[in-house]
Amino acid sequence: MKLLYDQIVNNDSRKYWRTIKSYTGNTFRSISDGPVYDKNKNIIIEKNKKLEIWNNHFGELANDSTGNSRSSTKWESLLITDGNYFPECDTSIKWSDITMALSDTPNNKAPESVGMNCDLVKMVFSDNAL
């Protein structure tokens, strides 16, 4: 686990996926082909019995015995509703707003550093509106 953690932290996705594939037999299919527990916590390895266990499991999920999928009451109580609301985010952005904001940016400022795509900046500055 430490190896996987280090690979994630160091942003080494290639080694990360290689490690996962080496543990899972090169595909994630091997995980689903492994043993499963029945309701009594017995390990089941026989294919037909495993299919029956999975079928029962997903069948129970689909039945929704709790009723949570039909009523949003439970999920609304889990949401944080005391967050800040910014009504200005609900208004539409006009092209003139974009060109005005970009014309105010310094010439030597790198647009990628503020999350703007260079192509957007080029398109705005090539517009006759400036």
Image: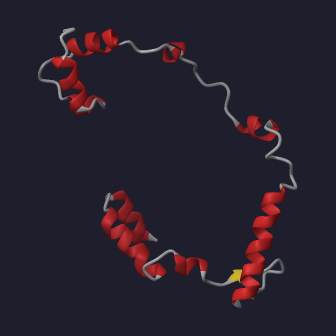
Q: Residue furthest left?
A: 108
Q: Is residue 71 above or below residue 53?
A: above
Could you tell whether 89 is left or right of 94 in the image? right
Residue 7, above or below 51: above
Q: Residue at x 83, y 40 (%)?
A: 71
Q: Quadrant of residue 101?
A: top left
Residue 111 visible to the viewer? yes
Quadrant including the C terminus? top left
Residue 42 placed where, x, y %? 78, 85
Q: Is residue 130 above or below residue 34?
A: above
In the displayed structure image, the side of residue 103 where residue 53 appears, left or right:
right
Res 44 visible = no
Q: Nearer the viewer, residue 91 or 3?
A: 91
Report the coloring of the rendering: secondary structure
Residue 12 picture location, percent across and down: 31, 62
Q: How many marks?
A: 0
Q: Quadrant of residue 64?
A: bottom right
Locate residue 107: give its quadrant.
Answer: top left
Relative image position of residue 92 (x, y in whole percent)? 46, 14
Where residue 77 appears, x then y in whole percent? Answer: 77, 35
The residue lying toward the viewer, choosing from 16 and 63, is: 63
User: Farthest residue in the bottom direction?
Assistant: 46
> Taking 89 as reference, is 81 above or below it?
below
Q: Residue at x 66, y 84 (%)?
A: 35
Q: Residue at x 32, y 57 (%)?
A: 11
